[in-house]
Amino acid sequence: MITKEDVKHVAKLARLELKDSEIEKYSKQLGDIIKYVEQMNEVDTTGIEPMPHAVPITNVMREDIVKYEQTKDELMKNAPCEEDGFFKVPKIN
């Protein structure tokens, strides 16, 4: 059973300010959640393979195919300032 002190402790860790009425409400709600999880723990899952997702998913992205690769010299033509083959940028303090 979740006590009011448990809810106050969790609220403090989460940096939440709760009213007394909220503490009462959340202690009941969290207690109900714990009871539900305990009920789920009673289910026999022997032989059931864990699933990463509830439904099968597939990757819908296309293959990454290089159509045109720019050379370093082509890219450096866009540099407003270049030094030793690298982009030169202003110093950040």
Image (cartoon, rainbow, N blue to C red):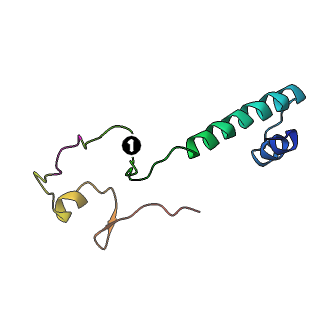
Q: Where is residue 39 in the image (x, y as percent from the top left)?
A: 61, 39
**Camera-side residue of 61 and 9:** 9
* Extreme residue toward the left, this view: 67
Which element is circle 1 on? loop
The residue pinned by badge 1 equals: 53
How crowded pointer 1 is (Cα within 10 Å; few <14, some 14-19, many 20+) is rated as few
Query: Image quarter for residue 1?
Result: top right
Q: Quadrant of the C terminus?
A: bottom right
Query: Image quarter for residue 56?
Result: top left
Q: Which is the main secondary structure of the residues drawn in magenta?
A: loop
Q: Which amino acid does label 1 sit on?
A: His
Q: In this view, does 65 lie above or below 58?
A: below
**Camera-side residue of 54 and 9:** 54
Q: In this view, does 3 lie to the left or right of 50?
A: right
Q: Where is residue 33 in the image (x, y as percent from the top left)?
A: 66, 36
Q: Is residue 26 magenta?
A: no
Q: Where is residue 9 in the image (x, y as percent from the top left)?
A: 83, 47
Q: Residue at point 34% right, 37% down? A: 55
Image mark count:
1
Q: In this view, does 77 lie to the left or right of 52?
A: left
Q: In this view, does 14 lie above or below 88?
A: above
Specify the segment rendered in magenta: 60-64
Q: Is residue 69 left or right of residue 55?
A: left
Query: Image quarter for residue 84?
Result: bottom left
* Extreme residue toward the bottom, this view: 84
Q: Is residue 85 above or below residue 47?
A: below
**Camera-side residue of 41 and 3:** 41
Q: Where is residue 68 in the image (x, y as percent from the top left)?
A: 11, 53
